[in-house]
């Protein structure tokens, strides 16, 4: 993935899609695209229950903390705030806080 949300904007035309962003100091710090009612749980005890699917979640490169090269993010917890927004969306839509995503191999753990 890269920090090019213009290329992803066409996904927002879907009725199931929602877009969210963290904006601070008049600049985008992170962005997320979610889809509602398009994905369902696979675990046996919850199979078939709907969830909010995080299709894209990105934090601006200037907010990445990479101690090995001495880079410390300008704003912290941007990704966490967006993820929490997806959980809130799940509650708002009656999905009980269920959220799903598939992380890229290069994604960092939080």
Image: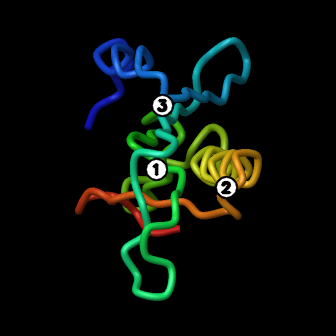
Residue 47 position (above or below residue 65): below
Q: Spatial distance from mark 2 to mark 3, Cα to Cα?
A: 16 Å
Q: What residue is rendered at 38% in x and 20% in y?
A: 5
**In front: 56, or 80?**
56
Q: Mark 3 to mark 1: distance in Å?
A: 10 Å
Is residue 104 left or right of 47 when viewed as pictured? left
Dot label at residue 16: 3
> Residue 53, labelled with which disc?
1
Taking the image as shown, residue 54 lies to the left or right of residue 78, namely: left
Q: Position of residue 93 (x, y in %)?
A: 70, 46
Q: Quadrant of residue 30?
A: top right
18 lies left or right of 25:
left
In the rendered view, would you say 28 is above or below 87?
A: above
Are discs 1 and 2 less than 8 Å apart at CB?
Answer: no
Residue 51 image position (x, y, % from top left): 53, 57
Q: Residue at x 72, y 23 (%)?
A: 24
Badge 1: residue crowd in 10 Å (few <14, some 14–19, many ≥20)? many
Farthest bottom residue in view: 45
The residue beneath circle 2 is 87
- Give residue 107's mark: none
Residue located 28% across and 32% down the image = 2
Secondary element at image label 2: helix
* Secondary structure category for the residue under label 3: loop
> Which residue is at 45% across, 69% downward?
109
Labels 2 & 3 near each other (Cβ < 8 A): no
Marks 1 and 2, the one that precedes in the sequence: 1
């Amino acid at each position: 993935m890269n920090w090019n949300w213009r290329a992803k904007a066409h996904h927002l035309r879907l009725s199931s899609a929602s877009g969210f962003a963290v904006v601070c100091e008049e600049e985008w710090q992170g962005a997320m695209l979610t889809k509602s009612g398009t994905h369902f749980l696979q675990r046996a005890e919850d199979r078939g229950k709907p969830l909010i699917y995080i299709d894209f979640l990105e934090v601006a490169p200037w907010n990445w903390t990479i101690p090995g090269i001495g880079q410390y993010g300008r704003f912290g917890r941007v990704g966490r705030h967006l993820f929490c927004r997806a959980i809130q969306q799940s509650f708002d839509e009656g999905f009980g806080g269920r959220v799903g995503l598939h992380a890229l191999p290069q994604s960092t753990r939080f």
